[in-house]
Image (tube, coloured by chain):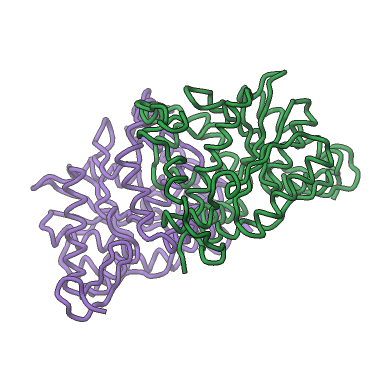
Chain colours: A purple, B green
Amino acid sequence: MKCTVCKGPAVIDLRRHNANFCPEHFTKFCRDQVTKAIDDHDMIAPGQRVLVAVSGGKDSLALWDLLVALGYEAEGMTIGLGIGDYSEASTAAAVAYAESRGLPLRRIDLRADYGYDIPTAAAVTRRVPCSSCGMSKRHLIDAAALEGGFDVVATGHNLDDEAAVLLGNVLHWQTEYLGRQVPALPARDGFPRKVKPLVRLSERETAAYCVLRGIDYIVEECPMAAGNRHLRYKEALNAIEAGSPGTKHAFYFEFLAKAAGHFQPEAAAAQDGLTACARCGAPTTGEVCAFCRLVERVEGADPVPVELVRSGRRR
Amino acid sequence: MKCTVCKGPAVIDLRRHNANFCPEHFTKFCRDQVTKAIDDHDMIAPGQRVLVAVSGGKDSLALWDLLVALGYEAEGMTIGLGIGDYSEASTAAAVAYAESRGLPLRRIDLRADYGYDIPTAAAVTRRVPCSSCGMSKRHLIDAAALEGGFDVVATGHNLDDEAAVLLGNVLHWQTEYLGRQVPALPARDGFPRKVKPLVRLSERETAAYCVLRGIDYIVEECPMAAGNRHLRYKEALNAIEAGSPGTKHAFYFEFLAKAAGHFQPEAAAAQDGLTACARCGAPTTGEVCAFCRLVERVEGADPVPVELVRSGRRR
């Protein structure tokens, strides 16, 4: 297998691009794809300050590394979720990467700073853990970006993620979410600008990028996500992609080109009537935002070990 | 397992309805679902003449049987496609059902009446066989309906079919097709009204209906469709449905309720500029319609045996 660019020994084949790459040209390919995503969707202007949401997994570390390599001023932020060993190893990977590269990393710990963790939140709310986890992360990163005066929040959602979320959104025709599922979401009252520079790279590619760049990421998947819908949607799309390489790319980018605009009215309508949370000032449809309500609800609850919560159901 | 209605012994469980049925109440369930589909989408008015597209498979025979049971004047039409033993058995099943019920069945044979068959068309056009097959069937049924003065054409597309077609249409965001993927398509210049009364029933349900009603249908799937995209989309949806019963129903009916309307402009635009075929008068975008062009192209071609054509590729 030879590199499509230099004919040297290739280390990865990309079926949907009908190309193979050596380490050097694969790294260039990744940078070019991120550059194209940023340009095509006006994600980040030169000189803007970027807050990168860092989990310690392949995607967020590849994102941070790529943004720095492309010359952006990118600061990291990581949140200790309290999901047992998994969270400890995730935070350790984020910290190790930041220290090795001399990059600034903001840290929050849900238990130390807000008195709860995700397993306990899942048990108390009796919802899937991914629900309180996603909400907590979004709230805290948005708040940190606004407080820190960042121009934009960057997250490591890759093409597989976006295609799976899109599949979930169309399977239930969640028109509000469809109107909002764009790779660059403008800032609006109380929300920072949010971008997804990895939308042109698959998760296999971000993993390969980390390996080739010597980035030590946490390989383990979140133990609480096992068996969730998102993973089932990924599997379904993987089966289709295997037979027709490029289907995921077409699914997501044709959506952006031909369909996302149709759902703007629903997305806009869902933002009508947002007010500031009476506690923290974040945008909310009620009097108190979902994050402050969660913090209040889990206050004083006995910590629940991760082993007792799986896919949203206590054993 | 007990019937949800009468508590007698049940023969089928329907997970997405959280119900079990005995033969009597399952038959009633099927009739009720077809009645609801016809009512909800204004498919057929009382007294209208219906032309049923009959392949000899479970769906089309169940449809015909259900329409007759519900009191509609439903005539059948079957097309000999020339796909070897499969087509012979299909036609035989359609004829046997019609004779046993004393129902009128119109018959066309592609080879005898138009000088070609599907394997030969696939080989000559070098396209997947499903392409010339679908086009030929649509053309001939539309023409027969208009010539015969029928008010509406009914086809046996079930929920699994519609969900798989919808998945294919969203995976490639074929907005024109999305705007047209409705269970009742109005008549327009040169096209008859077309309805799909089985959209609320799954293929497992139409098969069970045939078994319980003593309808001898062809169980074999078309040998030329094996491995095609539609079947892969069905498999992907089956995997999701197994984990979340009701997903297919929500996917299709939420689409109709919340999204199909968004794509009407694209569907309407695609119909602009249709003219009458110079040969047969059918609506077409060119001078001669796709059917007449196919007939001309395959004229005189040596018949290609079905064994030499698979999934659109000659071995």
- Residue A37 position (above or below residue B29): below
Q: Residue at x 53, y 59 (%)?
A: B303
Q: Could you tell whether B112 is left or right of A200 in the image?
A: right
Which of these two is toward me, B43 or A138? B43
Q: Residue at x 57, y 26 (%)?
A: B146
Q: Residue at x 71, y 18 (%)?
A: B46
In the rendered image, the residue lying farthest to the right is B8
In the rendered image, the residue lying farthest to the left is A47
* Image quadrant in which you'd find residue B285: top left
Q: How far from the left and from the top, in percent, is residue A193? A: 24, 40
Q: Residue at x 86, y 44 (%)?
A: B22
Q: Could you tell whether A157 is left or right of A289 in the image?
A: left
Q: How far from the left and from the top, in percent, is residue A128? A: 53, 50
Which of these two is toward me, A313 or B267? B267
Can residue A274 be seen at all in this image of the molecule?
Answer: no
Q: How far from the left and from the top, in percent, is residue B176? A: 40, 35
Which of these two is toward me, A311 or B194? B194
Can residue B5 be seen at all in this image of the molecule?
Answer: yes
